[in-house]
Image: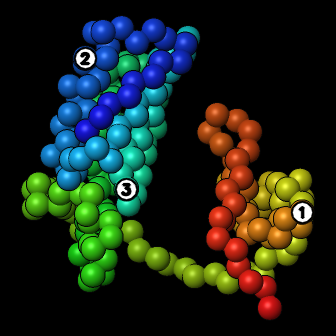
Amino acid sequence: MKYQIIGKNIEVTDAIKSAIEKKLSRMDKYFVINDDVLCRAVVQSYEVGAKVEITIFTKEMDFRTEVRNNDLYAAVDLAIDKLEDQMRRLKTRMERVKNQERGLGRSIAFENFKEEQVAEDSEEVVRTKSIYLEPMTLDEAITRMEALGHTFFMYLDSDDEEISVVYRRFDKGFGVIQAENHVRMD
C-alpha cells in the first residue's frame, strides 16, 4: 500500500509520518496489495485537538473515515478502528449477497478477518421511498433540504437536467454530487 500523509495547519514531521504509517500498516492485511491501493491521511491541527481523515482508494471501492480528538495519535487509532468496522460490515453484507464478491472482493483480503471479529450486521433497510425528482435550482434544493431538516436532498437540476444530491458538509458549507451517467427521461 502506498501512503500519502498531508498536513493542514501542522507540519508533518518525520516522527509523525513514521508513527502514522506504522499505525496504518496494520490495514495492509485487509487488502490485496498492488499498485492500485493508495492510503491518504490528512492531518489537521486546531487550537484544541486534531482531525484525521483517512481514505483508502482501491480500484473497486473507496473507504473513508474522519475523526476528531484531542490527541492526534488517538485520532489515528480511532480512525483505523472505524475503517476496520466498515470493512467487517461490508464483508457481512457481501456474504449475504452471493456473487457480489467478484467485484468489490477483488481488493479486499477477507480471509484475514478473524471470525470472531465479524459481528452480525444489525443495520438493515427499514424503509424504501420513491420520489419524483422535481426540476429545481441548487438554491431551491438547499432551501427544501433545510426546511425538511435533512443533511442531504436529491433533486433534478433544472440547469443541466442531471440527477443531483446536495448535502451539508461537516466543515461548513454544502457539497453537490451529480451522476455522470445520463438517464433518459421519456
Residue type indicated by callout 1:
Asp
User: Is residue 53 placed above or below 13 in the rendered structure?
Assistant: below
Cα separation, mark 3 vs mark 1, equals 32 Å
Looking at this view, is 101 or 43 the one in front?
101
| Cα distance between the residues tagged 3 and 2 | 26 Å
Above or below, comparing residue 48 to residue 68 in the picture: above
Residue name at image x 18 percent, y 37 percent: 26
Q: Secondary structure at mark 1?
A: loop
| Residue 59 tag number | 3
- Relative placement, left or right, of 101 versus 116 is right
The local crowd at label 2, few if under 14, some if 14 to 19, many if 20 or more residues have their Cα within 10 Å, is: few
The residue most toward the bottom is 186
Q: Looking at the picture, which amino acid does disc 3 mark?
A: Lys
Which residue is rendered at x = 70% and y = 79% of the image? 183
Please report the residue visible at 43 percent of the width from the left and 45 percent of the height from the top: 64
Q: Could you tell me how far apart the alpha carbons at marks 1 and 2 are, in whole angstroms?
A: 48 Å
Q: Residues within 10 Å of mark 3 (few under 14, many from 20)?
A: few
Label 2 belongs to which residue?
Answer: 18
How packed is label 1: few (under 14 Cα within 10 Å), some, or many (20 or more)?
few
In which quadrant of the rendered view does residue 43 lie?
Answer: top left
Among the 4 quarters of the image, the one containing residue 22 = top left
- Mark 2 element type: helix
Q: What colouring style does the render use?
A: rainbow
